[in-house]
Amino acid sequence: KMLSLDKQQLVIYDLTAGLARDSMIMLSSIISDIEESTVPPLRLHMVERDPLVASLLTDAMRRLDILADVEKNSNEGNIAKLANCLTMEEGDALSVLESMLTDTRSTDSVPYPPDIIYLDPMFPPRKKKASAVKKDMAILHSL
């Protein structure tokens, strides 16, 4: 609910993308309010530094684009809207932010400056020693 689409375009950078869970939660809260257009009112740019996780995320984005193409032909659902809002890159968060100050980016990239920068605390201390870590988080812990 904190995301407001009052602006013409809201830009969010998720600098700790991981498996994109937090990005999907952010988008799912407003995706039904987004209308089909050439320029989405929300752009969410994900950055992941681990090459293996970035590879998985890149493959997920590729599959999302395929599903969006199929969905465009059927005119139902929100997958195309989701694919239109998301971009990602592999890299360290600090390097990505520093490059925005020096690089001239194309019109296809996410505009700088971001309105919101999201940083996940990653692996907060466990409160209960007995509870098991979820499988996807256990994989990320091992990296």
Image (spheres, rainbow, N blue to C red):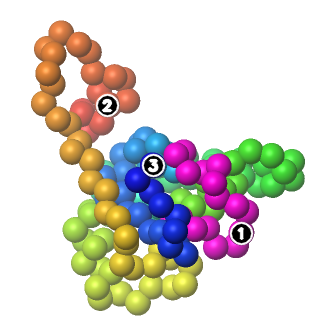
Q: What residue is shown at x 29% (from left), y 88% (from top)? A: 102
- Read off the residue under disc 1: 37
Q: Is residue 36 magenta?
A: yes
Pick the quarter of the image with the C terminus: top left
Q: Position of residue 33 (x, y in %)?
A: 63, 54
- Numbered disc 1: secondary structure: loop
Q: Which residues are magenta?
A: 28-43
> Which amino acid, mark 1?
Ser
Going from N to C along the chain, the mark reached first, 3 or 2, is 3
Main SS category, magenta section: loop
Q: Secondary structure at mark 3?
A: loop
Q: In the image, what residue occupies the spot 34% across and 22% down?
A: 134
Q: Quick one: which residue is furthest to the top in this view?
A: 130
Looking at the picture, how far across and down is residue 21, in whole percent?
Answer: 43, 41
> Quick one: label 2 or label 1, which is nearer the N terminus?
1
Q: Mark 3 to mark 2: distance in Å?
A: 26 Å
> What is the spatial separation of the Cα atoms under label 3 and label 1, in whole angstroms?
22 Å
- Residue 122 shows in the view: yes
Q: Is residue 8 magenta?
A: no
Q: Which residue is mark 3?
A: 1
Residue at disc 2, secondary structure: helix
Residue 80, picture quadrant:
bottom right
**For residue 2, side relative to residue 7 (left or right):** left
Residue 137: numbered disc: 2
Residue 27: percent from left, percent from top: 52, 50
Q: Amino acid at mark 2?
A: Met
Quote the CA–CA distance across marks 2 and 1.
35 Å
**Do the numbered discs 3 and 1 sit on residues whose CB atoms are within 8 Å?**
no
